[in-house]
Image (cartoon, helix red, strand yellow):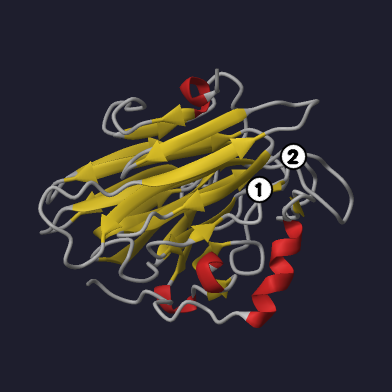
Amino acid sequence: MNDNGRWVRPYGTAAEGAFQVSITDAVPGWAHTSLRVATLEPFAQVELATGDNEIIVVPLSGGVDVTAADHAGQHHKARLAGRESVFAGPSDVAYVPRGANLTVTTGEGPAKVALCGAKAAKRAEPLPFRHLPAGDVPVELRGAGTASREVRNFGVPQVLDADSIIACEVITPAGNWSSYPPHKHDEERDGVETELEEIYYFEVRAEPGAPDGADPIGYQRVYGTAERPIDVLAEVRTGDVVLVPHGWHGPAMAPPGYDLYYLNVMAGPGASRAWLICDDPAHGWVRRTWAQQDTDPRLPMGGPR
């Protein structure tokens, strides 16, 4: 018997209030990260008191206005232009510190927005509110051949100063594999590995020319060690979430015909904010094969199709 029932949240099964997706420390065994996703009609809004969490506001589709009153009573505002969909290139994002009151508001059009969160206890004082333009989001083409994928690094330590959160987006073209070779980050080993729990939020779309009735899907694998077992093999659709408390994770698979997107949110208890991973030694050799392969020419994905 696998662990899908514990660590997989199909869309609609993790709703709370205005959020169609709500992953918080209310989930048994979950401690450091959160994710809330809201689909908003025109001229609608959603509010959140950040408490002891820092938040990155990420428009998934459409644009939003972000306002925040911080712990010192100062008010901040940013207009996030957003994008048509997660497949239409990077979005601008906003960083909201702990101890703030956050409001996200739509204008004349609808929007879908993700609030990526992490417990923020490493810094003595909350960090300032910030707006990161889409043009400042580094786009990395990782892997090669059928392991090619696009990584949008808006919330990694080299790009965004934060207390604990690490966040990025990954686009995997139809027929490709990502989060591969399988890797883990569930131990604190100085300079080698950091302990980070991780949220995967998925969206999937059909390639052009797909017939009516096509059912975009993807797949995600998580497996453990003998000392810390976990067994997840999930079929995922738009809005589904897979939680990775520990263990090897990958591949994330985009079947032929369907492009796969996922939003990753990571944080952990360690003193340093760093993404240090180790590959499953049975599969790490695959990285060496990439030197003889070209990057998938479909990447980067910069617009709707």
Residue 26 in the image: above or below residue 124? above
Kindly identify the amino acid type of the residue bearing the numbered disc 2.
Asp
Instruction: Work out whether residue 99 can be spotted.
Output: no
Q: Residue 260: horizontal and vertical position, in percent?
A: 38, 56
Q: Residue 276 sits in which quadrant?
A: bottom right
Comparing marks 2 and 1, which lies closer to the viewer? 2
In the image, what residue occupies the spot 51% across and 50% down?
Answer: 252
Q: How crowded is mark 1: few (under 14 residues within 10 Å), some or many (20 or more)?
A: many
Q: Quadrant of residue 1?
A: top right
Residue at (74%, 58%) from the top-left corner? 284
Residue visible at 41% across and 55% down in the picture: 254
Distance from disc 2 to disc 1, alpha carbons, whole Å, reads: 15 Å
**Foreground pick, 269 / 197:** 197
Which label number is shown at residue 186?
A: 2
Tell me the tag on residue 164. Answer: 1
Left/right of residue 234 with respect to residue 16 in the rendered view? right
